[in-house]
Amino acid sequence: MRKVYTIGDCVLDLFFENDSPVEAKPGGSFLNSSVSLGRLGVNVSLISELGTDRVGKQIKKFLLENGVDIKHISYFSDTNSNLALAFLDENKNADYSFYKTRKGLPDTIVFPKDVRKDDIILFGSFLAVKKEFRTSLTEFLQECKERGALIIYDPNFRTQHLPMLQEVLPYIKENMALANVVKASNEDFELICKMESSDQAYQWMKSFSDATLIYTANKKGLAIYNQEKYVFEVPAINPVSTVGAGDTVNAAIAFVLVRNDIKTSDLQSLSQTNITDLARIATIFSQDVCMIYDNFLPIATADRYRL
């Protein structure tokens, strides 16, 4: 089976409602995607780093329990593991406060050497624009692209990152140019380049990237740009928490590519059937995760679709 490699931070997410803690879960955008993929029976490996403290050990155990390969996780003992506080508003959207314990310290992440043609690389968020990490990351991505791997990028750009936008914008554009698929939300594009519609976002992106664009806009639906534009509505729901919704869309993309045996060379000529199936699965998965406090696909949903 093809392998999916995800690259991202591991954190412990603490959820708050009305300023009171209500739940704690392992988190980090690409940890979330990894767990969903593991539950779906996909061969997935998380490339990350973890502390050897109690939080790190809990996260490691959780990953193993959910079928995630951890051989590409590096470990540090000089600081504690990272935390993220998610304050949910009345619409169950999260405002984050991040506690990054390794700020200013070197990353311990070591990239694998065994990526093969048509394996999938899923990456993004702040780690993908971290200046100290850029050289090793871009070298790895370029090597993967030369080998024929399929690269998916999610900028997952947050409001708190705006002060550094001018510095990291070249990195975001470089990531989009390296990717075969860019999955980004309307909020991402509004913050990154002030584009307020999917058409504007696509026109901006295609001036430097030929990637397929999957544009999500929460309850306003999603659009997929692949030679042509495809627009899909989504059913209305009353979410418990929207944390992990975008990460589950990323997992859905990788899952459909693996399940439908869509290879790197197939992307530019995807059939309408495959595109519609992708939109359908992404909608089901993201909405199901919005109905629970977990950051990942519910086990019951994963069991229905498991490979």
Image (cartoon, helix red, strand yellow):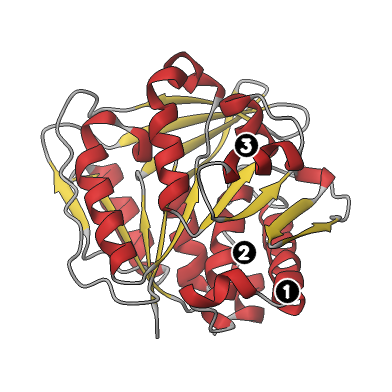
Instruction: Please indicate whether residue 143 sits to the left or right of residue 267 in the image.
Output: left
Q: Name the residue under label 2.
A: 298
Please tell me whether mark 3 sits on a helix, a strand or a loop: helix
- Residue shown at the point (88%, 50%) measured from the top left: 236
Instruction: Please indicate whether residue 141 sits to the left or right of residue 151 in the image.
Output: left
Between the C-alphas of marks 2 and 1, the distance is: 20 Å
Please tell me whether mark 1 sits on a helix, a strand or a loop: helix
Image coords of residue 12 (percent x, y): 40, 40
Name the mark nearer the viewer: 2 or 3. 3
Q: What residue type is labelled 2?
A: Pro
The label shown at residue 17 is none
Nearer-N-terminus badge (1/3): 3
- Residue shown at the point (40%, 30%) measured from the top left: 170
Q: What residue type is labelled 1?
A: Asp
Please tell me whether mark 2 sits on a helix, a strand or a loop: loop
Q: In which quarter of the image is residue 274?
A: bottom right
